[in-house]
Amino acid sequence: MVIKELDRLSRNKRDIKEELEYFNQNHMRIKVLDIPTTLFDFPEEQKWVMNMINNILIEVISSIAESERIKIRQRQREGIDAALQKGVKLGRVPLSKPDNWETVMQRVENQEITAVEAMRILNMKKSSYYKMRKRYPPQ
């Protein structure tokens, strides 16, 4: 199997090792384009040297990948916290109740129309309709 970078397997050092161990147990050879020693074919009597070198490189590179991921998450958290302190609203815009909600819900309660018809009248998707019903139950 050929991959461009080791961190394509995972950004977690433990997971990378588990993936590589799985491939090794299943007699699959991994070639990592960013690790040139994985691209060479060594004679059978020198494979242990290749394995030793590759293991050292993989240890170092997987540690770097993991620390980069930790740094990215930390920066992301700092950015989110800064935005929240400035009063920025994150996430989706909350659904607003349609003007004709009460009228349509009354018709559903009186069994004049079905929920599907109510969704069409309100121009709402099924998930939005049921979220609104939960938030504003018919009275």
Image (tube, rainbow, N blue to C red):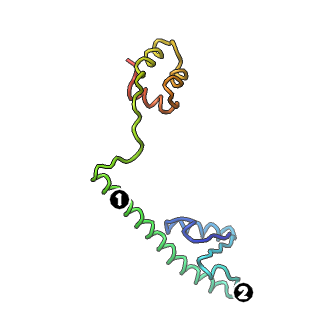
3D distance between C-alphas at marks 2 and 1: 51 Å
In this rendered view, identify the residue nearer to me: 52 or 61. 61
**The image quarter in which residue 99 lies:** top left
Q: Is residue 116 above or below residue 95?
A: above
Residue at image mark 2 = 43
The residue positioned 54% from the left and 21% from the top of the image is 117
Q: Farthest left residue?
A: 85
Badge 2 amino acid? Pro
Rendering coords of residue 37 (x, y %): 62, 82
The residue positioned 47% from the left and 14% from the top of the image is 107
Q: Is residue 70 left or right of residue 11?
A: left
Badge 1 amino acid? Gly
Rendering coords of residue 77 (x, y %): 36, 58
**The image quarter in which residue 75 lies:** bottom left
Q: Is residue 129 above or below residue 70?
A: above
Rendering coords of residue 5 (x, y %): 58, 71
Of badges 2 and 1, nearer the viewer stands 1
Residue at image mark 1 = 79
Disc ID at residue 56: none
Q: Is residue 67 left or right of residue 39?
A: left
**The image quarter in which residue 100 lies:** top left
In this rendered view, identify the residue nearer to me: 99 or 6. 99
Q: Is residue 108 left or right of residue 135?
A: right
- Name the quadrant of the N terminus: bottom right
- Name the quadrant of the C terminus: top left
Q: Secondary structure at mark 1?
A: helix
The residue positioned 59% from the left and 77% from the top of the image is 34
